[in-house]
């Protein structure tokens, strides 16, 4: 039986959390449609996205985008989407222990991503950045000085202690955890070029994993295509010069 | 074959994120040991916890507590621990779709918990509360006015639209998502008694679920025992009068 086409529902103008799902689908060459980017004519767009979240006929509508629709199934929360896609796309460890480890790595990436977001919105998601800038300066300093090194050092440790070598986080094959670590590093380099570059000097295996993922044929083709939305200051990783240093 | 005893490793003096695991183990009547609470003599305590995180012979040591040891398996990240325990303790939906939905609910509880933590630490986890109090006042206001209602309204929606009734989040049986929603509500009521009580007026099914979970025999016995650490101002949910309102 053929798998139905995967439908990704996410904000159409940012990488955001949806990017972790896009990367997995692209790296696996999966048949998918990025629904909200199809334009209003094709029942896409932000309005349709919001309507789906509020649809009273959908008892399992997620708290927020992204969510994935696959046949009758609807699943939200980035890490849960990847938990579902992992075995289907060949992007998770096969044993129960390895699949769980892949997921645990993803959840740790997610924690780092949430903290990266809060550097520019430390007080309220509903206020503008300019209205919380002085708090942002302080939060960003702690993130740069303490949290970026702590997260990247942990991933470096995982790579170095992997009994099957430091080319991958789980075993000796690509998993969605590798793709997500690539995206975390890519985002940190965009938003905090100075701080990320300092931290990566001490985490060469993480840097190498990032570069190797970017060189994989399907990933490279995706990154060079118009399907890859450029980083921008509406997303999670924002380049505000005053927050780097 | 008998299952080995579950070992929970978490800070011994707070509920924190470990509490979501304790509640699942207690509600299921599982055979477990809360290792760091056994005292230094029984190789417990905080020092042993820190040593285990740094042990170079453990390639899958987690980023932070809690972590669970079960036979040869070690798993960190609260949601991943519950993903592992769910089917073993009979606390997750049985079909793949229901198990995934249980997990998605848990991840949404985890997002709310992380935001609750940041109300008292909006700038840096390594600074004292008193040194970030003015930012905390602002962050707590946004959390009370916008985020508590948004999260609880979403869980209310899930309960009301559950085709099998509003007594449980998943199907018609207790899951770890119910236990975790209980804990979220309990924590919000402790830390933000006024704001939580306002929000719960509009979310009667959430309130009822909280009360019903607390009345379950094993849960009640646990809550009344010395094994339940009291809420305190070192944990995630802290009662600082100035942050409520």
Image (tube, coloured by chain):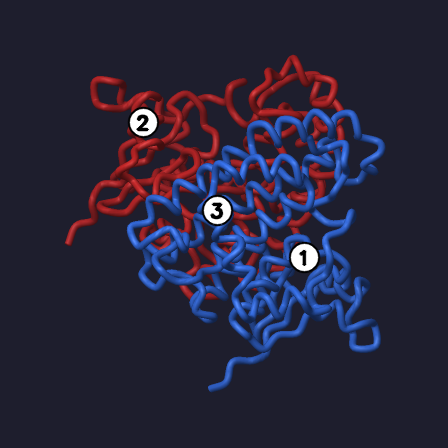
Chain colours: A blue, B red
- Nearest the camera: B220 or B94? B94
Few, some or many C-alpha atoms within 10 Å of disc 2 (few <14, some 14-19, many ≥20)? few
Identify the residue at horizontal 43%, vertical 34% (top origin): B64
Q: In this view, does A113 lie to the left or right of B245?
A: left
Label 1 vs label 3, nearer the camera = 3
Q: Do the residues labelled 2 and 1 touch (CB within 8 Å)?
A: no
The residue closer to the viewer here, B119 or B189, is: B119
Q: How many other residues sit within 10 Å of disc 1, few (<14), some (14-19) or many (≥20)?
A: many
Q: What element carries label 3?
A: helix
Quarter of the image for residue B111 reads top right
Residue at 73% across, 49% down: A235
Residue B223, image x, y percentages: 41, 29
Query: Do the residues bearing badges 1 and 3 touch, measured as CB atoms within 8 Å?
Result: no
Q: Visible in this render: residue B122? A: no
x then y, percent, for residue A31: 58, 77
Farthest residue, direction bottom: A1
Nearest to N terminus: mark 1 or mark 3? 1
- Neighbor class of circle 3 (other Cα within 10 Å; few <14, some 14-19, many 20+) is many
Chain bearing tag 1 is A
Chain for numbered disc 2: B
**Viewer-side label of 2, 1:** 2
Q: Which mark is drawn over residue A206?
A: 3
Q: Which mark is residue B51?
A: 2
Residue plotted at (48% across, 36% down)? A202
Where is residue B65? Give x, y as percent. Answer: 41, 33
Q: Quick check: do tags 2 and 3 share a chain?
A: no
Q: Distance between the residues labelled 1 and 3?
A: 28 Å
Q: What element carries label 2?
A: helix
Compared across the picture, whether B72 is left or right of B171 comes to left
What subunit carries mark 3?
A: A
Dot 1 corresponds to which residue?
A65
Disc 2 to disc 1, C-alpha distance: 39 Å
């Amino acid at each position: 039986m053929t798998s139905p086409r995967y439908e990704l529902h996410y904000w159409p103008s940012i990488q955001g959390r949806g990017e972790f799902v896009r990367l997995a689908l692209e790296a696996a060459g999966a048949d998918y449609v990025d629904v909200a980017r199809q334009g209003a004519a094709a029942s896409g767009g932000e309005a349709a996205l919001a309507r789906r979240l509020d649809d009273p006929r959908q008892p399992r509508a997620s708290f927020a985008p992204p969510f994935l629709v696959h046949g009758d199934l609807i699943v939200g929360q980035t890490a849960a989407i990847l938990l579902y896609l992992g075995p289907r796309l060949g992007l998770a460890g096969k044993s129960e222990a390895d699949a769980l480890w892949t997921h645990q790595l993803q959840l740790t990436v997610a924690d780092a991503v949430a903290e990266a977001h809060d550097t520019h919105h430390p007080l309220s998601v509903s206020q503008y950045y300019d209205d919380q800038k002085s708090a942002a300066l302080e939060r960003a300093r702690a993130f740069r000085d303490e949290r970026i090194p702590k997260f990247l050092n942990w991933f470096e440790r995982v790579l170095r202690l992997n009994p099957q070598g430091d080319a991958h986080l789980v075993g000796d094959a690509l998993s969605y955890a590798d793709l997500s670590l690539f995206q975390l590093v890519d985002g940190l380099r965009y938003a905090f070029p100075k701080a990320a570059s300092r931290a990566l000097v001490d985490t060469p295996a993480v840097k190498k994993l990032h570069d190797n993922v970017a060189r994989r044929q399907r990933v490279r083709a995706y990154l060079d295509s118009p399907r890859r939305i450029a980083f921008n200051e509406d997303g999670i990783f924002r380049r505000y010069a005053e927050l780097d240093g």
